[in-house]
Image (cartoon, rainbow, N blue to C red):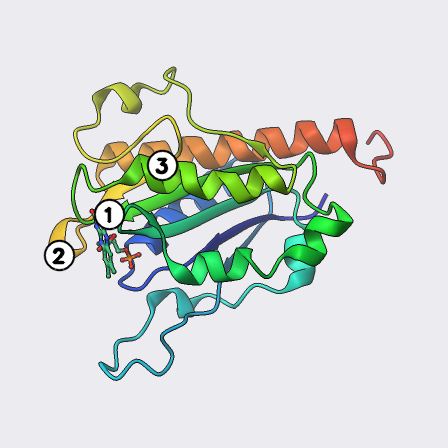
Amino acid sequence: MAPILVLYYSHHGSTKKLADAIAQGIVSEGGEVWVRTVKSLHENNASGETAQSLSAPEVTRDELAQCSGLALGSPTRFGNMAAAVKHFLDSTSAQWIKGDLINKPACVFTSTSSMHGGQESTLLSMMVPLLHHGMVMCGIPYSEPALHDTVTGGTPYGVTHVANSNNTALSDHEKALCLAQGKRLAQLAKALYSQFSENNDGA
Ligand SMILES: Cc1cc2nc3c(=O)[nH]c(=O)nc-3n(C[C@H](O)[C@H](O)[C@H](O)COP(=O)(O)O)c2cc1C
């Protein structure tokens, strides 16, 4: 079974924190992981700011096609995903035509600066293209105690972080939900691979 792809864009590093914690959850479940980024659209930004996402390698088409599951992350931008993530998704027609992602599990995650700044709308909008790809969306069930207890990020639609204006660290509840999301994605990837993969030999 191929690794699970944790794919994100992060300008200031908060979405990257979620990506790294989800990857930890996948690995703790025995899954292999590719942590990758999409191309930044701000390479020539006159401000000279560095996109934090560039600390991970840029994803290749082959990795997207071959992955056994996908965690897709973006900062919230006006209640929606960042243009770099949408730009990447808009370039995946070849994988859609071939059906490379059909019956593979996916989850979505986001970071905002404010508590009610559009986390759910961002997550829901990120799910739509993945449903077109035939992916099986997976959120977080309320059997996770942190989903009840969090006073910062964390939604049943996917993990989130409230970074405030100073890129705060993940709260303990946000971290716990990232680990739970990663584990669940890895469990579903194994189950769906065993059920649907053409190459599955039953092992
Ligand atoms: C153009 C732009 C739009 C934004 N829109 C929102 C928003 O709608 N709601 C919100 O809470 N934060 C918004 N933010 C703040 C970012 O979502 C927040 O700083 C996030 O944690 C950045 O993630 P990153 O560190 O991974 O880049 C926006 C930031 C930018 C630059």
Say which quadrant the N terminus sits in: top right
* Residue mark closest to the camera, 1 vs 2: 1
Question: Given the image, on which type of amino acid does mark 3 rest?
Answer: Val
Question: Residue 60: percent from the left, percent from the top?
Answer: 62, 65
Q: Please state which amino acid type lies under the numbered disc 2.
A: Asn
Q: Which residue is mark 2?
A: 166
- Taking the spot 54% from the left edge, 44% from the top edge, the residue there is 129
Q: Is residue 104 visible?
A: yes
In the visual, does 99 lie left or right of 154?
A: right
Q: Position of residue 103 (x, y in %)?
A: 69, 34
Numbered disc 1: secondary structure:
strand
Is the distance from the Cβ of mark 1 to the nearest ligand 1 atom less than 8 Å? yes
- Please identify, in this view, whether the residue under mark 3 or under mark 1 is nearer the observer: 1
Vertical position of residue 179 compared to residue 37: above or below: above
Which is more toward the observer, 72 or 55? Answer: 72
Q: Is residue 20 visible?
A: no
How packed mark 3 is, by other alpha carbons closer than 10 Å (few <14, some 14-19, many 20 or more), is many
Q: Residue at x 84, y 29 (%)?
A: 202
Circle 2 packing at 10 Å, graded few (<14), some (14-19), many (20+), is: few
* Numbered label attached to residue 112: 1
- Mark 2 and mark 3 lie on one chain; the one further toward the N terminus is 3
Q: Relative to the observer, which residue lies in front, 52 or 97?
A: 97
Which numbered circle lies on residue 201?
none
Classify residue 157 as left or right of residue 168.
right
Q: Which mark is residue 159?
A: 3
Disc 3 or 1, which lies upstream in sequence? 1
Q: Earlier in the sequence, mark 1 or mark 2?
A: 1
